[in-house]
Amino acid sequence: MGKAVGLIEALGLTTAVTALDAASKAADVTLVGFEKIIGVGKAVGVNIQIAGEVAAVKAAVDAGVEAGNRVGVIFSSHVIPRPHEEVEALIAKFGNNLKKKQDNKAETKNKKTESKNKKEEK
């Protein structure tokens, strides 16, 4: 792979989105997944997973943590440079989960639009 994986665990969606925004703007990284975690700090946490070149991921995670801490709480962050093949398989699974979520949202939106159009036709 020759790449790295970065993880940022934030308290709440607003903090996670702020961290992801800053991370994405800081370097050339790709969002490969996110997970809602219940029980982090006795609240709901969001773990975001990004991937890219080692230096880019390090810069992105640092920027994301800094931005996230300005608006909320970042519980932890970590960069895994050149992960083992087994970790790469896990990253691929995260990416597939993200794609499925996006596809489901698009499908739901299309169904709502079709339903609305049918009602307007009547």
Image (cartoon, helix red, strand yellow):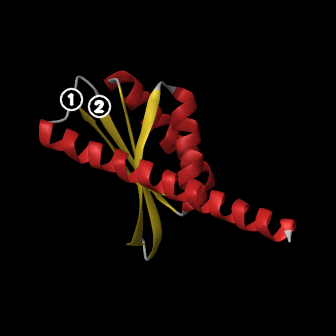
* Image marks 2 and 1: residues in contact by CB distance under 8 Å: yes
* 10 Å crowding of disc 1: few (<14), some (14-19), many (20+): some
Residue 23 location, x and y as percent?
Answer: 51, 36
Q: Which residue is mark 1?
A: 82
User: In which image quadrant can residue 29 be found?
Assistant: top left
- For image coordinates 60% across by 47% down, the residue present is 18
**Horizontal arrangement in the rendering, residue 20 relative to residue 113 (left or right):** left
Residue 73 location, x and y as percent?
Answer: 52, 58
Q: Which residue is mark 2?
A: 4
Which badge, 2 or 1, is on the more N-terminal residue? Answer: 2
Residue type at mark 1: give it: Arg
**Horizontal arrangement in the rendering, residue 57 relative to residue 83 (left or right):** right
- For image coordinates 47% across by 24% down, the residue present is 28
Residue type at mark 2: give it: Ala
- For image coordinates 53% across by 34% down, the residue present is 24
User: In which image quadrant can residue 4 be found?
Assistant: top left
Tell me if residue 65 comes above or below residue 109 in the rendering. above
